[in-house]
């Protein structure tokens, strides 16, 4: 696996998609989705130019932190987070992408309070209303955003989505465009407080160029950097 080549290809495609959309290529950040990768592979990716890693599972996050695998890069938590595991994540990552319930929001806020810090978060939106997926449904997003804006130990930074796997090119553009509208709605509602809502985390290996075209500021890419993953059992 030529990680340097893969990273450069992805970075070039992000830049090209941004320019084609009339955007500053510097306004889109690449987050390497490192699930199932070893400490050594993560170190190689960082040596190849990765500056931000996204971790899915609490257990893998803990192991990689323990092994100092992320040295030279920042870390985000991008996977589904259970309320009883917030202690292992709050204060250990720069941004939590996957906040999708009042209960989880409250748990993060109180853990951050306990640690005396403010945790940056995104709200995950189930943009296609898929039964089996995490994320707050669009109808409930305004209420959850309102609540997040009122949490003193949480700083709302924006939104994240994992649209369905699309079989046709451009198939997810409508969802990405919807996400941009949701973000604009939230920005329109914030008063002058401690929140800075400017992050739109969307786009994966199959569709990150479309996501950039529709306004993504952060794309989460795994396969296009690391190659195909072995099949994994569903998370519990
Ligand atoms: C695995 C994963 C990605 C990256 O998926 P690829 O299709 O391999 O690029 C992005 N976001 C989340 C939340 C993931 O779990």
Image: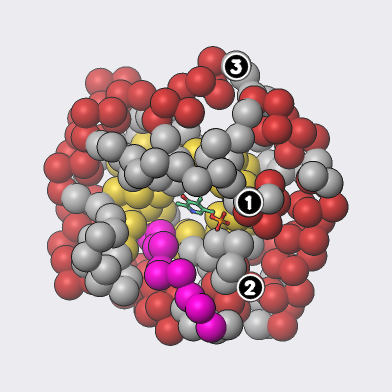
Q: CA distance from mark 3 to mark 2?
A: 33 Å
Instruction: Nearest to the eye among marks 1 and 2: give it.
Output: 1
Residue occupied by mark 1 = 228
Q: Which mark is residue 209?
A: 2
* Direction from residue 60 to residue 113 in the image, left or right: left
- Callout 1: few (<14), some (14-19), or many (20+) C-alpha neighbours within 10 Å? few
Front residue of 24 and 129: 129
Q: Main secondary structure of the magenta part?
A: loop
Quarter of the figure with residue 204: bottom right
The residue at 27%/68% (across/down) is 130
Q: Which mark is residue 35?
A: none
- Callout 2: few (<14), some (14-19), or many (20+) C-alpha neighbours within 10 Å? many
Q: CA distance from mark 1 to mark 3?
A: 24 Å
Residue 36 visible within the image = yes
- Magenta range is 159-168
* Direction from residue 138 to residue 203 in the image, left or right: right
Front residue of 139 and 39: 39
Q: Earlier in the sequence, mark 1 or mark 2?
A: 2
Residue occupied by mark 3 = 67
């Amino acid at each position: 696996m030529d990680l340097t080549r893969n990273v450069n290809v992805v970075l070039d495609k992000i830049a090209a998609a941004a320019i084609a959309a009339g955007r500053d290529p510097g306004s889109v950040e690449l987050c390497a989705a490192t699930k199932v990768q070893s400490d050594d592979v993560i170190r190689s990716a960082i040596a190849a130019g990765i500056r931000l890693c996204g971790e899915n599972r609490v257990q893998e996050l803990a192991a990689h932190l323990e092994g100092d695998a992320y040295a030279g890069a920042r870390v985000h938590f991008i996977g589904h987070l259970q309320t009883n595991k917030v202690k292992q994540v709050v204060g250990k990552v720069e941004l939590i992408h996957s906040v999708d319930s009042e209960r989880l929001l409250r748990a993060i806020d109180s853990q951050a309070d306990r640690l005396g810090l403010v945790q940056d978060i995104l709200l995950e939106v189930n943009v296609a209303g898929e039964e089996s997926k995490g994320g707050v449904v669009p109808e409930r997003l305004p209420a959850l955003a309102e609540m997040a804006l009122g949490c003193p130990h949480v700083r709302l930074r924006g939104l994240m989505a994992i649209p369905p796997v699309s079989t046709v090119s451009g198939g997810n553009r409508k969802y990405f465009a919807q996400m941009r509208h949701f973000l604009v709605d939230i920005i329109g509602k914030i008063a002058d407080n401690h929140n800075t809502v400017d992050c739109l985390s969307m786009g994966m290996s199959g569709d990150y160029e479309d996501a950039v075209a529709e306004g993504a500021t952060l794309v989460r890419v795994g396969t296009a950097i690391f190659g195909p993953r072995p099949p994994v059992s569903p998370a519990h």
